[in-house]
Image (cartoon, rainbow, N blue to C red):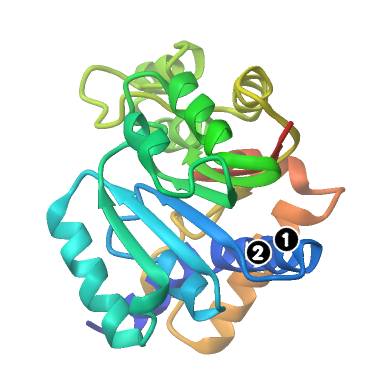
Amino acid sequence: MPEHTRRTQSLRTVALWDAVEALATGLAAECDRSLRVLDLGGGTGGMAVPLAGLGHTVTVVDPSPDALAALTRRAADAGVADRIAAFQGDGDSLSDLPAAGGFDLACCHGTLEVVDVPADTLTALAAILRPGGALSLVVAGRLAAVMARALAGDFTAAKEALTRPDGRWGTGDPLPRRFDSATLQSLLAATGFSQTTVTGLRVFSDLVPAALVDSEADRVGLLDLERIVTTHPDYAFLGQLGSALHAIARRA
């Protein structure tokens, strides 16, 4: 893989990892111990393996046996196989997990867009968390799709994405639904969560051609820009244009 491609790929994930690492570190300090983490839809372990590397115990639930096999190999290569458990399943099977009701942190990244009933999945996630446990939730952002279709000259599709309740730009849209911040916060409040914050991810990273991020200085500059628009109180509104929205909430 070319070096500039690797850099662009890391730009897609580094801001999320920074946020999850900070969340996990804070929770561990509250608990004064390592965490019990659930990763729903965790696939090949992109989040689970580094969390296990921090000393936490991670349970990954994913419907794909191939992804779970890759996770097992990845965990072994990283030397954290003893801290990762893999289960084939989905949101409907969470109550059957050994630590159900006692997880400290649940990650659900890129999954809520494709489940049958998002509210049911969030309710199940709330149920497996201990009181005060945290949820890290990443979903596709509606406004990014609106901007992308408009910039491509497809104004009808942009209007569809903006006005349809499911945030889709038409029948050819590969995602069943997208979210905006207000909808996401309402859904979380209705399913047992509180203290919700929503920030944007990949506001610029999915728009900037890889050829323009061809040096470490370019990469650092783009990351700094992403952090400012998603965290600074004066500019955080721009985060709503992110390709993904990252919600952090506590079980009420």
Residue located at (70% from left, 69% from top): 25
SS assignment at label 2: helix
SS assignment at label 1: helix
Whether residue 43 sits left or right of residue 246 in the image: it is left
* Quadrant of the image occupied by residue 43: bottom left
Residue farthest toward the front in the current orientation of the protein: 98
Q: Nearer the viewer, residue 115 or 177?
A: 115
On the image, the x and y values in percent for residue 17 come to: 55, 66
Residue located at (45% from left, 21% from top): 120
Whether 192 is drawn above or below 125: the answer is above
Disc assigned to residue 49: none
Quarter holding the N terminus? bottom left
Whether 91 is drawn above or below 158: the answer is below
Quarter holding the C terminus? top right
Residue located at (33% from left, 77% from top): 81
On the image, the x and y values in percent for residue 85 come to: 34, 63
Q: Nearer the viewer, residue 12 or 93?
A: 93
> According to the image, label 2 marks what residue?
24
Name the residue type under label 2.
Ala
Whether 244 is drawn above or below 141: the answer is below
On the image, the x and y values in percent for residue 64 come to: 18, 49
> According to the image, label 1 marks what residue?
27
Q: Nearer the viewer, residue 105 or 139?
A: 105
Residue located at (48% from left, 49% from top): 99
Marks 2 and 1 close (CB-CB < 8 Å): yes
Whether residue 196 sits left or right of residue 201 in the image: it is right
* Quadrant of the image occupied by residue 28: bottom right
Tell me if mark 1 has few (under 14), some (14-19) or many (20+) residues whose alpha carbon lies within 10 angstroms of its own. Answer: some
On the image, the x and y values in percent for residue 142 come to: 50, 29
Q: Is residue 135 visible?
A: yes
Residue farthest toward the top in the current orientation of the protein: 164
Name the residue type under label 1.
Leu
